[in-house]
C-alpha cells in the first residue's frame, strides 16, 4: 500500500457510514470515477472563450475542454 492509499482509507473510515453497503457503494463509485471516460462534444458552441467546452459523460454538465476531471461529479476524462 502507498501512503496516499492509507490516507484515503483513513478518510473513508471517518465518514461514518450507517451501513456497510453505503460504505462499499461509496468506494465503488469513487473507483469507477477514476476510470477515464471520453467527454461528449457540445452540439453547438454557446460559450465565448479561447477554450472549447464539452459535456461530462456521467453528469452531462458543461465543462472546459482542457479539464482532467469533471468539476461537478469528479469523473476523470480521457482526451486520447
Image (tube, grey):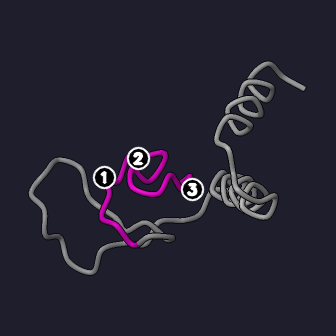
Residue under circle 3? 78
Residue under circle 1? 64
Say whether residue 16 is magenta. no
Percent position of residue 66, x then y? 38, 46
Helix, strand or loop for the magenta stretch, by majority: loop
| Relative side of 17 to 2, left or right | left
Tell which circle, 2 or 3, labels the residue nearer the N-terminal end: 2
Residue 38: mark in rendering: none
Q: Quadrant of the N terminus?
A: top right
Within 10 angstroms of label 1, few (less than 14), some, or many (20 or more) residues? some
Judged from the image, the secondary structure of the residue bearing numbered disc 2 is loop
Q: In this orientation, which residue lies closer to the viewer: 67 or 59?
A: 59
Residue 67: mark in rendering: 2
Picture residue at 39% right of the left edge, 50% below the top: 71
Q: Is residue 54 above or below residue 68?
A: below
User: From mark 2 to mark 3, how far is it between C-alphas?
Assistant: 10 Å
Amino acid at each position: 500500500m502507498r501512503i496516499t492509499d492509507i490516507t484515503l482509507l483513513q478518510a473513508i473510515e471517518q465518514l461514518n457510514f450507517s451501513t456497510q453497503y453505503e460504505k462499499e457503494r461509496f468506494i465503488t463509485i469513487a473507483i469507477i470515477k477514476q476510470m477515464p471516460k471520453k467527454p461528449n462534444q457540445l452540439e453547438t458552441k454557446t460559450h465565448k472563450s479561447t477554450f472549447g467546452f464539452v459535456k461530462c459523460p456521467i453528469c452531462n454538465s458543461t465543462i472546459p475542454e482542457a479539464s482532467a476531471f469533471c468539476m461537478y461529479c469528479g469523473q476523470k476524462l480521457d482526451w486520447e
